[in-house]
Amino acid sequence: MATQFADAVSIDSGTIQEAARRPNSGCDNNSAVNDDRLTVARGILTGALIATPFWALIAFTVYMLV
């Protein structure tokens, strides 16, 4: 048991006491670049374009059932 404690003391380098730093995100988050009035409109239009095939499939299914 004393050997295990001695090993633990030699491994401890004191890094636990250092202040934690914020991790690097790897990219710049500049909100001024994305501050555009058309951002919301582009998001809605993109969502509508992505959803169009699904709505067409639902409409075709309803048409075939009627």
Image: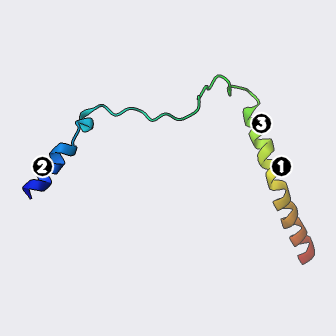
Left or right of 34 on screen, residue 63: right
Mark 3 and mark 2 residues within 8 Å of each other at the beta carbon: no
Label 2 neighbour load within 10 Å: few <14, some 14-19, many 20+: few
Percent x, y of residue 35:
68, 25
Taking depth in this image into account, of 27 and 36 the one nearest to the observer is 27
Taking depth in this image into account, of 42 and 59 the one nearest to the observer is 42
Q: Residue at x 7, y 55 (%)?
A: 2
Residue hosting label 3: 41
Residue hosting label 1: 49
Quick one: label 3 or label 1, which is nearer the N terminus? Answer: 3
Quick one: label 3 or label 2, which is nearer the N terminus? Answer: 2
Helix, strand or loop under label 2: helix
Percent x, y of residue 6:
12, 49
Residue hosting label 2: 6
Taking depth in this image into account, of 36 and 9 the one nearest to the observer is 9
Percent x, y of residue 38:
77, 30
Mark 3 and mark 1 residues within 8 Å of each other at the beta carbon: no
Q: Residue at x 58, y 32 (%)?
A: 27
- In the picture, the quarter occupied by the N terminus is bottom left
Label 3 neighbour load within 10 Å: few <14, some 14-19, many 20+: few
Tell me if residue 51 comes above or below residue 14 in the rendering: below
Q: How far apart are the alpha carbons under marks 3 and 2?
A: 64 Å
Camera-side mark, 1 or 2: 2
Left or right of 5 on screen, residue 31: right
